Amino acid sequence: MTTTTPDLPVVVIGAGPAGLAAAHLVEHGLRPRVLEAGPAAATAVREWAHVRLFSAWGEVVDPAAEKLLAPTGWTRPDPDTCPSGGDWAEQYLQPLADVLGDRVRLGARVTGVSRAGRDRIVDAGRDEQAFVVHVTHADGREERVYARAVVDASGTWSTPSPAGGSGLPALGEKAAADRITYRVPDLRDPAVRARYAGRRTAVIGSGTSAFTALASLAGLAKDEPGTHAVWLLRRGISGSTFGGGSADQLPARGALGLAAKAAVDDGHADAVTGFRTEAVERDGDGRVVLVGEDGRTTAPVDEVVVLTGMRPDLSFLSEIRLGLDERLQAPTELAPLIDPNQHSCGTVYPHGHRELSHPETGFYLVGMKSYGRAPTFLAATGYEQVRSVAAAIAGDLEAADRVELVLPETGVCGGAGLFDDAAAARTDATGCCAAPEPALVKLGVGAPADAEVADVATSDGCCGS
């Protein structure tokens, strides 16, 4: 069982949107085995069920998956409406997992990947050896699965970035864990709503997940007096800060940024710019005080929502020879194409198996995880990645190299939307990463509607916060 053969399965790690695109492997007559750590397909998506995508159904259904679903009587929802994470999971991802049947194994956490009988040091006969995937099941049972190829679609949801401006947790951040969340709060939940109602909340981040949180808290403030947000940005307020408006080819994305701007304009949030968190402290009443690297401190807040992006978990890949960009932790050939200093999701060049390959032949990162720390990802990109990789594994290089993808233009990509409706205006803006001057900004009603803002709720903003 240690020599790779066509009879071995292709192991896919993760049963999220990209992992369930294993439908492409089925099209090529390959045997996918999808290993999902959670108790259900799309476990991570279900954790942000309350958040609405800003991509419509027409952009988040994979054509190969639709072919598998069609014989079951499944019909795609209105292609022009935007699903919530819950809608996406229940109306598309779960039915797809059901069709894939026993090819999807739940409660199967991958704890390591290697070559059978070869650690990462050994060259001799390496490419001829099968992959060996170590799995721990929910009941504690351990298993080794041999594979002809491995496609890691495990995403980045499990590893949110910290509040600390250095990329490391701020001093005191872990000790204040009872007051900090790294997810967009679900204010429909009575217990969560009570946690934020009538209180001051710091929101750290400058991407669309932060916009979603600000808009949600502003809505709560209208019903619960005393609710207020303090928005901490590492950069400054500029034409690129808010949203794409009516010019955005993903209308819900544009509307979301303008909703966040309205939260500030209407006095429900104050924006503090040029603030890079160095420490998290407690005052005498147990409230949280955030300290910037320049020594500034915030007034005490009751809660902190950290939405500074996500990063890949590479811990179980230590025996695989990866070729990763030193900054983005994305595949070396892909990194220049997705660099958020240069690209939005609409300007990412179409790519496939060649850009996703590593020194370890037959191993691929796809989906959000392939983007490392870059926030410029859209679901349609992941589907095209899997299509190309599946063709390459099957040996159809002509199909694998035929990479065609048209993405919506404008915006800083990678958060989640809140609304189905398009709204608002936009003026053109330049890059999103200009160095900020420290400032407290409170935008008044009637301030210029300058904006520039991005499908899945597993990443966040431009420049990390």
Image (spheres, helix red, strand yellow):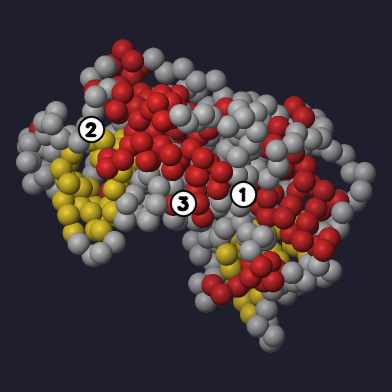
Quarter assignment of residue 362? top left
Residue 61 in the image: x percent, y percent?
50, 30
Check the image and report above or below for 15 versus 125.
below
In the rendered structure, the answer to whether residue 172 lies left or right of residue 140 reads right
Q: Amino acid at mark 2?
A: Arg
Question: Number of labelled discs?
Answer: 3
Whether residue 326 can be seen here:
no
Q: Callout 1: 10 Å neighbours few (<14), some, many (20+)? A: many
Residue 391 vertical position relative to residue 266 in the rendered view, above or below: above
Q: Which residue is located at x 43 percent, y 26 percent?
A: 70
Identify the residue under disc 1.
51
Q: Which mark is residue 31?
A: 2
The tag earlier along the polypeptide, 2 or 3, is 2
Residue 451 spot, x, y in % from top left: 77, 37
Label ID, residue 44: 3
Type of amino acid at the residue the image marks with label 1: Val
* Left or right: 344 in relation to 100: right
Identify the secondary structure beneath mark 1: loop
Residue 206 position in % (x across, y down): 66, 49
| Distance from the alpha carbon under mark 3 to that under mark 1 | 12 Å
Mark 2 vs mark 3, CA separation in Å: 24 Å
Q: Nearer the viewer, residue 225 or 124?
A: 225
Q: Residue at x 16, y 51 (%)?
A: 144
**Mark number, residue 91:** none
Q: Amino acid at mark 3?
A: Ala
Q: Which quarter of the rendering shows the N terminus? A: top left
**Vertical comparison of 22 with 259: above or below:** above
Residue 108 visible at all: yes
Q: Counting other residues with Cα less than 10 Å from the Cα at mark 2, is it few (<14), some (14-19), or many (20 or more)?
A: some
In the shown orientation, is residue 367 left or right of residue 217? left
Q: Secondary structure at mark 2?
A: loop
